[in-house]
Image (spheres, grey):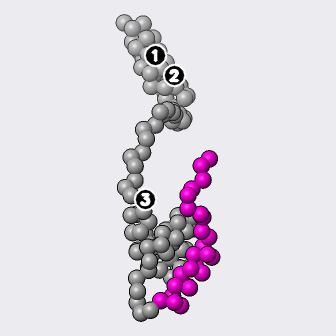
């Protein structure tokens, strides 16, 4: 794996750099770009909220700097494989068919039968009765 050209900075090292700058600055000078780059690098590892709190910088400013450093996000790649999962079949309700004719009564009780089975059975019964 290729290593990055910039050395990795820890949160404690960045905090020390920011504190040293606060003690040595004159007036309300802006934070140099090098320090912002360090804060962005740390925020990528530690998170924006924690980094902004520890370094005592504004959260929104750090978030904007991170967005500017990464640039626009690339379009996600289309999936090369999509798995289609069939949903679990729900238990089918009970079905009772009662037929009454000249020859007598017929009661059919179906449990967990799909609707296609009931339709086929009904069709066969009607055809045989006529």
* Left or right side of 92 for 16: right
Dot placed on the residue nearer the N-terminal end, 3 or 1? 3
Whole-angstrom CA distance, mark 2 to mark 1, is 10 Å
Q: Nearer the viewer, mark 3 or mark 1?
A: 3
Numbered disc in front, either 2 or 1: 1
Q: Mark 2 near mark 1, Cβ–Cβ under 8 Å?
A: yes
Q: Identify which residue is drawn at 52% across, 70% down.
A: 38
Question: Where is residue 81 shown, x and y percent of the image?
Answer: 49, 32
Q: Secondary structure at mark 1?
A: helix
Q: Position of residue 69 (x, y in %)?
A: 42, 62
Mark with earlier residue (2, 1):
2
Residue at 52 percent of width and 66 percent of height = 41
Neighbours of disc 3 within 10 Å: few (<14), some (14-19), many (20+): few
Query: Which residue is outermost to the bottom?
Result: 27
Does 112 appear in magenta? no
Disc 3 versus disc 2: nearer the observer: 3
Boundaries of the magenta span? 1-25
Numbered disc 2: secondary structure:
strand
C-alpha distance separating marks 3 and 2: 69 Å
Q: Which residue is mark 3?
A: 70
Foreground of the two, 130 or 4: 4
Q: CA distance from mark 3 to mark 1?
A: 65 Å
Residue wearing tag 1: 121
Q: Which residue is mark 2?
A: 108
Image quarter in which the C terminus is found: top left
Picture coordinates of residue 113, whole percent (x, y)? 52, 25
């Amino acid at each position: 794996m290729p290593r990055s050209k910039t050395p990795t900075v820890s949160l404690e090292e960045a905090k020390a750099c920011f504190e040293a700058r606060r003690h040595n600055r004159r007036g309300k000078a802006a934070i140099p770009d090098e320090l912002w780059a360090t804060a962005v690098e740390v925020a990528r590892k530690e998170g924006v909220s924690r980094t902004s709190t520890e370094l005592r910088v504004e959260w929104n400013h750090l978030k904007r700097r991170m967005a500017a450093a990464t640039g626009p996000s690339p379009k996600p790649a289309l999936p090369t494989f999509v798995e289609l999962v069939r949903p679990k079949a729900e238990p089918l309700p009970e079905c009772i068919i009662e037929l009454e004719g000249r020859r007598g009564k017929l009661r059919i009780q179906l449990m967990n039968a799909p609707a296609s089975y009931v339709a086929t059975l009904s069709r066969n019964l009607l055809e045989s009765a006529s």
